[in-house]
Amino acid sequence: MKHTLIFLITLLALTLNAQAQSYEMLYAPDTTWYDPADGDVTISSYLKNISGTTDSIFAKRIANERAPGHRTAFAWNHLSFAYEINSSEDAGIYVVLQDQEVDSSFQLVLSPDQNGGTTKVTMRFYNLNDTSKCLDQTYVFVSSSATAISQTELEHGIMLGKPYPNPAHHLVNIDYQLPKHNQKAYVYVVTLEGKQVLQRPLSPTENKATLSIRQLPAGVYFMYVGLDGRRIGQTRCLIR
């Protein structure tokens, strides 16, 4: 009896684990920085079916915290983008994936207001016939305006300028201002997907940092100051 009970518990655990791991998100940035002046922003993700069966995988918004004036849309393979009326009225769109197959791409698009702001969208990927096979993924869009610094931060003497030269090649400079008492500030460089590629400590007694970017591939990057756990004054830099 004891061995039978252990066997049943093990079988149940394996079954629940198989359900919990029905799909795998191979690529999906948690945070994407954008410039409102650039218009629509698109994130691409890649979903792998590891359910053991061929599934019709639906994508549906389950949470949509939009900044004023923002719209979001989503599609499989750039086809039939579905803009929301509101979160509760979203219709799911689907793609058929065999076991171990990777979909070519799922896209989430933000159409921002010119004033920027932060929009957070949570998508659920699931099998309509077996909702235990599901995966939730949250995407966050954050505007990168260097002037988007709160009055509180200005009052405390915090400022981040724009990088120069821009475009940059081997070196890039950025001006900043920190509270004199602070000793734990860093400048971070991240990719469009939010991956950190460079960081440097900043001194509160100086007001300019020079970063070597020789090792970074050409492309668009964002820079921001990390101060006491806060992210302040994101700005954009083009590296050639």
Image (cartoon, rainbow, N blue to C red):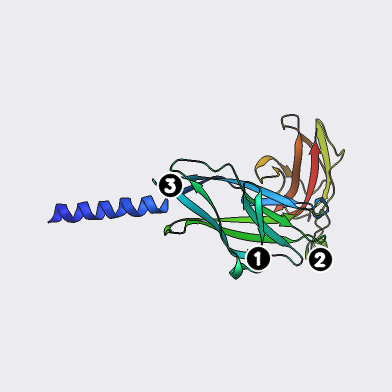
Disc 1: which residue:
65
Amino acid at pointer 2: Gln
Along the horizontal axis of the image, is 74 left or right of 102?
right
Q: Which percent across, then down, holds residue 87?
A: 61, 67
Cβ–Cβ below 8 Å for labels 1 and 3?
no
Q: Which percent across, then down, holds residue 48?
A: 50, 44
Residue 54, numbered label: 3
The C terminus, quarter of image: top right
Q: Nearer the viewer, residue 64 or 84?
A: 84
Q: Secondary structure at mark 1?
A: strand
Mark 1: give few (<14), some (14-19) or many (20+) Cα within 10 Å: few
What distance separates the C-alpha of mark 3 from that of mark 2?
A: 54 Å
Q: Which percent across, then down, holds residue 151?
A: 81, 65
Q: Nearer the viewer, mark 1 or mark 3?
A: 3
What distance separates the C-alpha of mark 1 from that of mark 3?
A: 33 Å
Q: Secondary structure at mark 2?
A: helix
In the rendered image, the vertical position of residue 128 relative to residue 201, given as above or below? below
Disc 2: which residue:
151
Amino acid at pointer 1: Glu
Extreme residue toward the left, this view:
1
Look at 79% across and 49% down and name the residue there. 235
In the rendered image, is residue 55 in sight?
yes
